[in-house]
Amino acid sequence: MATTTTPLRAQLESWPVSGPFRSDWQRLHRVAIGANPFTAWEWISTAWDLFGSREDRIVPVRFLDETGETRAMALFREGRRRRGGRERTIWRTLDFNAQRITPILAPDLATWLDAVDSLFEMPDSPFWRMEWYKLDSLDGQLLEAVDELAERGLACQLRPFNEQPRLVLPDDWTEYRRSHSKSFWKSRRKSRNQLARRVGEIRYLRLREPEDFDHGRLEAALVDIETVFRASWQYYEIATQADYCPETVWRFHQKIIREFAFRGLADLNLLYVDGRPVSFDWNVRHEKSVYLVFGCYDQAFADYSTGTILTVDQFQDGHARGDRIYEFGGEFLRYKKIWTNDSVHAYRLTLQRKNAWTRGKKWLDGFRRSPE
């Protein structure tokens, strides 16, 4: 089990946050366990600005040690929900468009645990329960963390939130090809040949290194991506939803791509036929993994499986560049499992406040351990 470090104090701040809060978030994000691009400041703030609920609000939190130094940070979404016949205040994660996240930025598990503990030690508690979604496994430490929180007197309920397929590529590309049948590759080769013969030359373009986006190439790629998006089935599907509109979804992706491109985090893949963009995948890079974020194809080319052609091209090209893990996220599992050979879970964790008995027991245990 992780051991307790210096006790922390949770300090609430207002939204929009101050410049120092944002700077400290970015600094801590570089060293926090479980941190990834989905917990980057740009991702969270952009998602909230575009998709945030008018009924909810963001609660920024610093976790301070006894010297006043910020040791951990968090952003929660506060909302009112009916639970047990009463209106209750719930603090939940900010997980718009994310795959797996950590709800608290902390440099190690012990600090992460103390930060959680300090939330439940706040006087005049501002929430009734925590509901955290899409949690990362914290490098396999999440179960240990939940056990530790339970020992500290919290009522914890951890369960899988969704399954997230992954493609783990071997060092030899031929070995991956052998993992699929000959007919699998034959059908994809047939689609490519038909497309080239009936429509025109096929060209694959990948932009992912910061220098790839120079000289107007980023803006040109964004124009082509938007063109495909507006011709895709996803565009019309999103247009039928009450909570979103295609223009808002596009503004989100466009802004994030611009934020990430020159930091080496964006990975744009486009397929052109006879000079016309027909499909795209935009991904996020992080350490050894590539996260597939959003992809579409022009419905006019549905008979040629242009999305599949692009998938083969980017995996083979990525393998040559050193990519070994492609993360697919948690929806449309049937399609994703065609390509993948592994899966992991994102988790949901609910945390209840300590009752009087457990709080008293903790005080008594501390009294017994204190020096004479």
Image: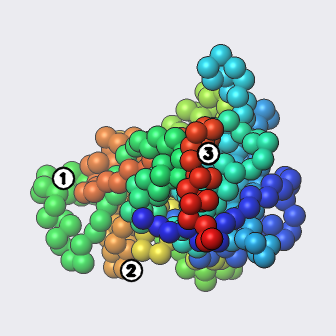
Is 43 or 269 nearer to us in this picture? 43
Quadrant showing the N terminus:
bottom left
The first of marks 2 and 3 along the sequence is: 2
Is 21 or 272 nearer to us in this picture? 21
The residue where tag 3 is placed is 360
Which of the labelled discs sits on residue 107, or is there none?
none
> Residue flagged by tag 1: what amino acid is it?
Phe
The residue where tag 1 is placed is 184
The residues tagged by marks 2 and 3 sit, at their Cα atoms, a distance apart of 57 Å
| Neighbours of disc 2 within 10 Å: few (<14), some (14-19), many (20+) | few
Question: What is the secondary structure assignment of the residue under circle 3?
Answer: helix
Q: Quadrant of residue 139?
A: bottom left
Residue shown at 24% from the left, 78% from the top: 171
> Residue flagged by tag 3: what amino acid is it?
Gly
> Residue flagged by tag 2: what amino acid is it?
Arg
The residue where tag 2 is placed is 321
Residue shown at 69% from the left, 20% from the top: 86
The tally of labels here is: 3
The first of marks 2 and 1 along the sequence is: 1
Mark toward the viewer: 1 or 3:
3
Residue 349 at x, y = what percent? Answer: 50, 44
